[in-house]
Each structure stands twice: as C-alpha cells, then as structure tokens.
Image: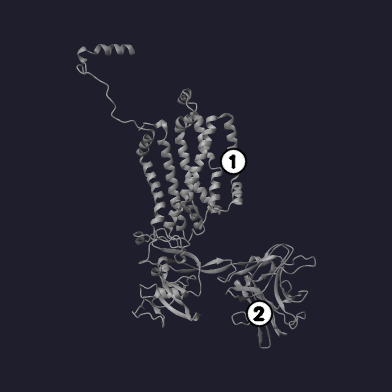
Amino acid sequence: MADENIKKTDESLEKDQFQFVQKEEKIYDKKFQTKPIGYFKDAMIRFARNKTNVIATTILGTLILLSVFVPILSSKNAEALESQLAHLPPRMPILENFGIADGTSEFEEIPISYDNPYINEETGEPYLDPVTGDPLYLPEGEYSRFIEEGTLINYVIECNDADEGCEGGFVQLSKGVANKPVAFYSTAASVNDTGETVFNVQTFTGISSPTEAILELKLDINNAFNDNVFNGRAEVVAYLQANDAEKTMVKIFDSSDSSTYDSLTDDGIYTVEFSDLPDLDFDNNNYKFVLSYDSNIKDSVVIDYIRLSARRGNTRYGDQGPFGRHLIYADGYELSNFALTTDVFTEDNESVFVGSVLRVGGERLTASYTVDSYAKAFGPVLREGFPGSEFLELVQGCTYADGTAYDVDDPQPGLMSDDCAIYELVSRNDEDAVNIGGEIYYTYDVYLNYRVYAGYDEIPYYLFGTSAAGFDMVKLIWIGLRTSLLIGLLVSFINIAIGVVYGAISGYYGGQVDIIMQRFAEIIGRIPWLVTLSIMMAYFEAGFTSLILILIISGWIGVASITRTQFYRYKGREYVLASRTLGAKDGRLIFRHILPNGIGTIITSSILLIPTVIFSEATLSYLGFGIGHGQSFKLFGLDALELSGVSIGVLLNDGRNKLRNYPHLTIFPAIIISILMITFNMFGNALRDAFNPALRGSE
C-alpha cells in the first residue's frame, strides 16, 4: 500500500515543476564569523540566562558586601558597653507612623512595686484603675512619663514563690517519707548589711513567767489536704524546743488531743492557752517554736497562719504583727520562709523530721503596659554620685533653663538648658567631699540629658534595635555575618581541598588503595561527635582554634565521597581510555578529563557545605564550645581579616532566652541566616547546571 502511494505521487509531478537554483553561480565554503566559546564562558552564559539564579546570586553578593562595608561605615556603637541603650526595640522611619517598629516595647506580667505608683505628670495625682478605683502601680525602675497613656493595667496572677511580692495564699507542709513527720521552725525577718531581708530561726528570749501565752493556728477547712487532720487520721503538733543540751521538746498543742487546746472554730482556727504548762521554764530557758505534721501516709497539710502572743500583766512580748504585739504573726510570705527542722535526731542518729515547705495559692499583682523605650533611654536619666570632674566638664557653657549662668562656686539645683548634657542638677553632695592636696572634689546627683550626653543631635533610629550591651543590632548582625562567612569559607575551603584530593585518589586508583582509604574515612566518620568535641576541649579552650578543628576533623568526608563517586563514574569513559592510550599521565587524566566532568556535582555539594558549616558553628556557639563575645582571631595574621567573637550563632544564642520580651534579638539574625541558606542553595544549584558538561552549548 505504501509503494502504491509513492508511485502515484511520482506520477503526479511534472518536469516543468523542477528548476535549478543558483545555476550560474559558484558556491564556496564560508568562514565562520563567530569565535569559539570556552568552557567557563559557556557555563556563565547558561548561568546568567536563568533570572532566578541571577537574583539569588545578587542577594548573596549583597549580603557579603554588607557584611564587609556596614561594620566599616556605620557610626553606631557595637564595641563599647552602653547599658543605658540596652534592649531598645526596632525603630524605623515611615513605618513608625503606622505603629510598626515605632520604638515602643510591650511588657506583660511584670511584678509591680507599691513604692512606684503610676503618676499623672501634669496633675501629680496617681492614676486609678477604671474598674476597681484602686491606684495603679508600675514595676520598679519604670517612670510614669515614659508609659504610653491608657496602656497600663494591673492584674493578679497566681504565684507559689517564697518572696514578698507573692501575697496571701497558704503554706503546704509536706512529708518526705511515710513513716516520719515533717516540721519547721518559726523564723523572724531582719535586714542584713546589704539591705536584703533574711529569715533566721527565732528564739524567744526575755520572757519571764508569762501570765498569758496564746497560740492561734488556722487550717483551711475547705482544703482536701486537711481532711485527715479534722477527721483525726493525722495530727498537727506544736512544740517549744528548749536550747538546753537535750533540746527538750515541750508539747503545747496536738490537733488529735482536744485536751491540748481550748477551742476549734467552724472555720478551722485552733486556740491554745499554755502559760500554765509545768514543763515550761521561761526564766531559765530560751525556746524555739516547732510545728510538725504526721500521718500514716506520705501526704501534706495546708496552713493559713500561725500567731503566738505572750504577756505578763500589761507587758506584752514580741514585735510582730500589725501592732507589734506578737511573738509570731506569720502567713503567706513570712510563713513560707519558716525553716525546715532537720537538726533533730534519734538515738541511732537518724533524722526525726523529713519533708518540705511549699507556698501555694499566692497572688502577685503584676502590670502590662507599653513604654516609649527611646524616650526612656535618651530622656532624663538619674545618676547619683556622678563624678565631679566629668560634671564640671559637661556643665561648661551651660545655663539654667531660665537663662541664668551656672556658678561653679555656688551650684544651685535646677533645670538646665536643652542643649546641655546635664538635664537637671539635683544636688552637690558636700558631705561626700574629698580633700586631696588642698583641692576639694565633689560628687553630684544629676539627671543627664542622655541624648546630648551620648553625642546625638536628635534621638537616633536603631533599625534592628539594640542588644543587651546597647550595641546597634544592624552593625552587630553584619559583623556576625562577616565572621560566620569567613569561618564558613575557611573551613569549607580546607574541607573541599582535602576531600577532592582524597576522593580523587581513592576513586581514580580504586582497588586496594580505595579499600584502605575508605576504611580510614569510615573510622573517622564513625567517631561520635561528642567524643570529638570532648577531645578538642581537653586540648584546647573554647574558641576559634577548637571550633575550626572540630569542623575540619570529619567535615571533608562528604566531599571526598562525592568526588570518589564522580571518578568511578567517568574514569572508564571512552575519551578517558583514549587519552590514556595516547600516553596521558594520571595528573592530566584526573584534572583535564575526569574532574571537569564531575565538577558540577562537586561544586554544588561544596557550595552547600558553607551554610552547613555556618549552622554547625551556630550549634557549637550555642552549646558554649564555639566562639563568644570578647574573642578575636586574625586570618593569616592580617588585621583586615580579623574575626570578632560575634557570629550569627552567638547572636541567636544571646536572644534565645529573651525571645518573649525582646524578639528582635532573635528575629533579625534568624532572617539573615535564613536568606543566606536559601541563596546559597540556589547559587549552588545554579553552578551545578552551569558547570555540567552535558549541557554545554544548550539553550
């Protein structure tokens, strides 16, 4: 059938339909007008043809350039500690007009201070809670003038801490083991030399033959922990322990023995009058108050309060309580600081009392609010005991706000002019004056105009905020990125050089050479990472040297494996065999015929090795085995290649525990390292395609 169609087609063509083209012309071979394209030029043409690759490379190049030039050109501080500017949030032009990155910080559940009420700056009156009508309070260290109006609220949260800010609640006395009671001593609060409140075991002294001694003990009747006490299956016992050699324990109350107390109210208050107990001898002994709890099981009792009072005639003993008329007046905070009784032993030298004291059901008044962090940081800042020499230098040429000149010999408290670094002179501390060589030196209490003091004409913008040390995060991030990149490039270069040479030898020669080299690589690769880390830490301190060595020890194995695979893939190809037949040496075969064909895969894995190293460095720095603030290292001894102790990993570690209140410390370094990872991946894939010999000359 096909032959018949062909025959019919041939028969349908006429001779006059055929013509000779260029019959009278002579045709010659023409020389190509284009120049030959080299391997690398062809690769770059294919690389540039993909716009995504170009964009990724541009972004990557921009990051690298910023890491080089921003630390050099930026005038912001990233070297000297400036605690006044610590933790400033991001503040960006234009965006701040929309409430985004406007330099304000929001805080939640911050404990308040009753000594710091929220004051209306204009009227001087405290702000009141619109619901309860109670005064509003700020946390310690906050100033009313910097709080965004209408943002402050006070509210109560539950707490179980043994500190003064945790109010009310109960104290849970818990047994440590089933067959032993638990007990605590009463304590009394005092203030030590550093101004801290401390609680010491209380000893009752100076009490002489009291005519009345009353113990009040309240147990919450609605708490399930106390059911065993009220049902008689457990007992709460109070003792007075004498400070004699035997530490005699005199029982003054037992919840399981109604004869030991005078009354028990419906709301769980036990009342005991024990002044007439014959075993008590206040005239010859000092006593400690001990309260114990015991039952047949390992459980707890919850105590509301303990009150102990004593008097002789009209003379009352003790200074605790609202009127200073109790020996013990403890609930909540004070009761939670009672000391466990652990110094009473049996004849076999075993502890009698075992257990713990816990605070439960307390309440803490906290605040949520928004503060203008930049106004607070650069506004009036109180400095007490300000050095006189620095003060006199700053006050030169300044006048008071009303235009009166400042008199060094007669310093008067008052507000200074707006262009003066001293916002307000509070006082000169004449009582602290020091006479040295006939020259008198003073200190001053002042408010600094910190904007002028720090050398700014206007409040600056910190686009990424500041760190805990007051460093500009923009500058700090690029310094960290520069360090991370240099470490990544250095370690990757070393690993690639070792891996390519090792893998090329192993893959090219094969046989016994390959077997031996692969077993060695497997041994190195099988060493646990923690073992490598421990060995390095045993010989080197945490820092650049140990970090680089840790990353190099087994980092080359992946590149070596890929290189070996590529050599096995290409070394048996016809063009390699032909070249060997023509007398090519091993070096030429490796570097001119085999390696170029496998370079695409090797380059891709090598480029991706850089972000891998950066992440490894971040992990080590996070664990404390990498670099850190204050360290430095000069590559090849060159100042231009000096690495600081700040890297992206270090910055992420710094912000890890402050993510809730200062998220900018983590967000911006995380964004930078994410972009870095993405662009490196795209760049590596682009290079793989560009250097793939199979695609040479393709569109």
Residue 294 image offset from top left, x and y in percent: 72, 67
Q: Is residue 117 visible?
A: no
Give whichever of discs 1 and 2 has the lower sequence position. 2
* Element carrying mark 2: loop
Residue 199 image offset from top left, x and y in percent: 63, 73
Kindly identify which residue carries mark 1: 524
Q: Residues within 10 Å of mark 1 (few under 14, many from 20)?
A: some
Q: Residues within 10 Å of mark 2 (few under 14, many from 20)?
A: many
> Looking at this view, is 363 or 583 the one in front?
583
Q: Quadrant of residue 335?
A: bottom right
Which residue is outermost to the bottom?
Answer: 314
* Element carrying mark 1: helix
Which mark, residue 603? none
**Distance between the alpha carbons at the discs numbered 1 and 2:** 71 Å
Position of 491 relative to 419 (above/below): above
Q: Are the residues flagged by discs 1 and 2 in contact, CB closer than 8 Å?
A: no
Which residue is outermost to the front?
Answer: 437
Position of 569 relative to 528 (above/below): above
Q: Amino acid at mark 2?
A: Leu
Q: Is residue 308 left or right of residue 410?
A: right
Position of 39 relative to 185 (above/below): above
Q: Is residue 605 visible?
A: yes
> Looking at this view, is 159 or 483 the one in front?
483
Kindly identify which residue carries mark 2: 327
Q: Amino acid at mark 1?
A: Ile
Q: In the rendered image, which quarter contains the N terminus?
A: top left
Q: In the rendered image, which quarter contains the C terminus?
A: top left
> Looking at this view, is 232 or 17 the one in front?
17
Residue 264 image offset from top left, x and y in percent: 67, 75
Residue at the image point whose x is 41% and y is 76% from the top: 424
**Of tags 1 and 2, which is closer to the observer?**
1
